[in-house]
Image: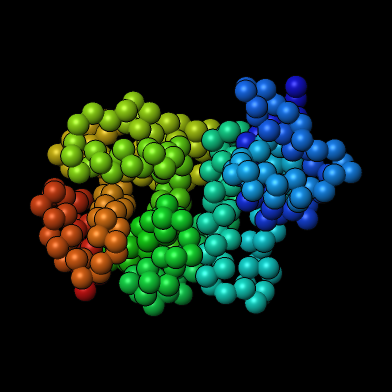
Amino acid sequence: MSDEEKLIKIPITQLVKFSDSFAGAEIHLSVAGKFVRLNYATDEFLDILRRLQQKEVEQVYIRQSEVKVIMKEIQESLSARKFYQSKTTVEEKVEVLDESMKTVKNIINQIGVDSETVTLLRLVNVRTMSILQESPGLYAFIKRFKKNCSEEFLRAMLTSYVLALMVDKFPWRSESVKEKGAMASLLCDLLLDKKDFEILRKWEKDGGELPEHIRNHPFEIAEKLRQKRDLIPFETITIIEQHHEMPDGSGFPDGINGGRINQLSAIFIVSQRFIELLCDTNFDYEMRFLIVGRLQKKYQGKSFEKAMEALTSIVR
Ligand SMILES: [Fe+2]
């Protein structure tokens, strides 16, 4: 079977969203380990999908060549003409970006990283950053978008937002540095699913043993991205590798100490942790000073102290 004919798992919601491009596409279901083709060209594509949704089926399989069509559709919906000139609200734009990111995640997990995926990723990143730049402040942003996107995407956006404000406190600040950091926030947990996040959050609170695949996720996603190192900045890959490391060497995957964690990674780690803790309080912004105080105790050492200074000055 050629790559193009391989079957790729896809959420039905995505097919419904882009249904115009898929009339006549083959839909397969996995039943007891075997693929069953559900439709033929004469069948009503959307009817089949809706019936499956009624039976609470969430995923189907389509050919890899059809997945490429979805990617083109998404790219088109993120083109400057469509994204900025249509009458869609900012909330709808965030929804489109969230959906796009879910597709990219799905594709990278099943097919891997190729030039087309990276192009799409960069587009999602640039459009996300433009929305963040227009936002009047962190809390206003949380209030506005909390209900419009998945928690995962919200966390990534908020991390990018805080990171950008922190980077502004350094003499080497630039849009390109912020873009590299924002890209890392979209990509760093690409290999984790909902259950993994729950395990990870429990571990952060209680400690104990972490499953091997969670321990290795920074390293594994960095390895995948390195295959396209000409398209993904090495700073982004370094942040991803280091995003769970701690100044005292108690982090993972390598347990390196603070001296080996560079300034941009330290800023990323602090901004991501700040957002995680804020999220744990269900975004109770009143708790922000308490969170900063807690982080201050944990994140010490040269690059982390500078990162904490920057965080303190932006959290007012
Ligand atoms: Fe992670």
What colour scheme has been applied to the protein in the rendered image? Answer: rainbow
Closest to the observer, 102 or 35: 35
Q: Residue at x 50, y 62 (%)?
A: 128
Q: Position of residue 178 (x, y in %)?
A: 41, 59
Q: Residue at x 33, y 63 (%)?
A: 162
Residue occupying the far left of the picture? 297
Q: Position of residue 285 (x, y in %)?
A: 25, 69
The tally of labels here is 0
Q: Is residue 170 above or below residue 261?
A: below
Q: Position of residue 98 (x, y in %)?
A: 53, 56
Q: For this view, does 121 lie left or right of residue 168?
A: right
Q: Residue at x 29, y 54 (%)?
A: 276
Task: Say which quarter of the image contains residue 306.
Answer: bottom left
Q: For this view, does 252 lie left or right of residue 305?
A: right
Task: Say which quarter of the image contains residue 18.
Answer: bottom right
Residue occupying the far right of the picture? 42
